[in-house]
Image (spheres, rainbow, N blue to C red):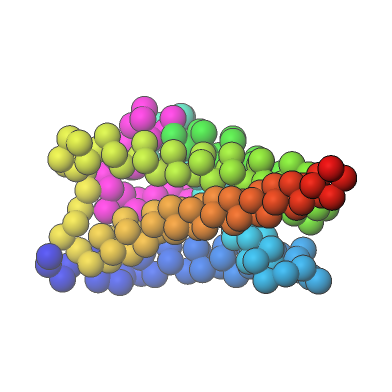
Amino acid sequence: MHAGGELGASAGGSLLLFASLLAVGCALGLRLGRGRGTADRGSLAWLCFNALVHFAVEGPYVYLSMVGNITDSDALIASLWKEYGKADARWLNFDPAIVSVEILMVVLGGSLAVVLIYAIVKEKHYRHFVQITLSVCELYGGWMTFCPHWLMGSPNLNTNSWLYFWVYLVFFNGIWVLIPGLLLWQSWVELKKMHHKGSNSRKKFQ
């Protein structure tokens, strides 16, 4: 692996934007989660960041791709996608598979993130149903983004740069695998606790 892809102004600006979204998401999530446990506060911070990314970053990508393509766009947000396109060229021009997945992520993923935030804050009974659905949606999006491309030999992926491979491809996509996986595990544990509690309550009346 070569040492190309140094951190220039374009890359720095893109990373700064994501850092800003993360800071805003964490601040909002921690504020909404005041008085709650660590796990819920962490979940809310992630969900706020996640919703911001879906609506503020991926939403404009879908729009720009539907009316033209990222390569020819002069929109400010297009510069972020042009930078990411250095790692995965499919994002630079209209790719039906990518745009289809992104429509799913913006419409369903973003909406479910907002619903889940509300469900956690208000302690709604459907919290874990939504959490499981959202997590599976995120994992499905990642799978359909990369698996078909891997089967074709990944012709559009640039793995010759530590920045493009480890930061753009591995890290930024990996967190949308790791955290949904952790949320699935949390839901499994909580549903298991509810089942045991319900079973023990029934036994008392037998």
Left or right of residue 38, residue 103 in this image = left
Question: What residue span does the magenta drawing correspond to?
Answer: 71-100
Where is residue 12? Give x, y as percent. Answer: 39, 70
- Give the quadrant of residue 110: top right
Residue at image point 54% right, 54% down: 185
Residue at image point 26% right, 44% down: 89
Judging depth in this view, the residue of 77 and 28 nearest the camera is 28
27 in relation to 149, above or below: below
**Is residue 171 among what the camera can see?**
yes
Residue 72 highlighted magenta (yes or no): yes
- Give the quadrant of residue 38: bottom right
Residue 60 highlighted magenta (yes or no): no
Which quarter of the image is occupied by the N terminus?
A: bottom left
Residue at image point 63% right, 60% down: 43
**Is residue 72 among what the camera can see?**
no
64 in relation to 84, above or below: above
**Residue that protrudes farthest toward the front in the picture:** 206
**Residue that protrudes farthest toward the left in the picture:** 2
Where is residue 40? Give x, y as percent. Answer: 69, 63
Residue at image point 60% right, 70% down: 23
Judging depth in this view, the residue of 1 and 191 nearest the camera is 191
Judging depth in this view, the residue of 176 and 124 nearest the camera is 124
Which quarter of the image is occupied by the C terminus?
A: top right
Where is residue 176? Give x, y as percent. Answer: 46, 53
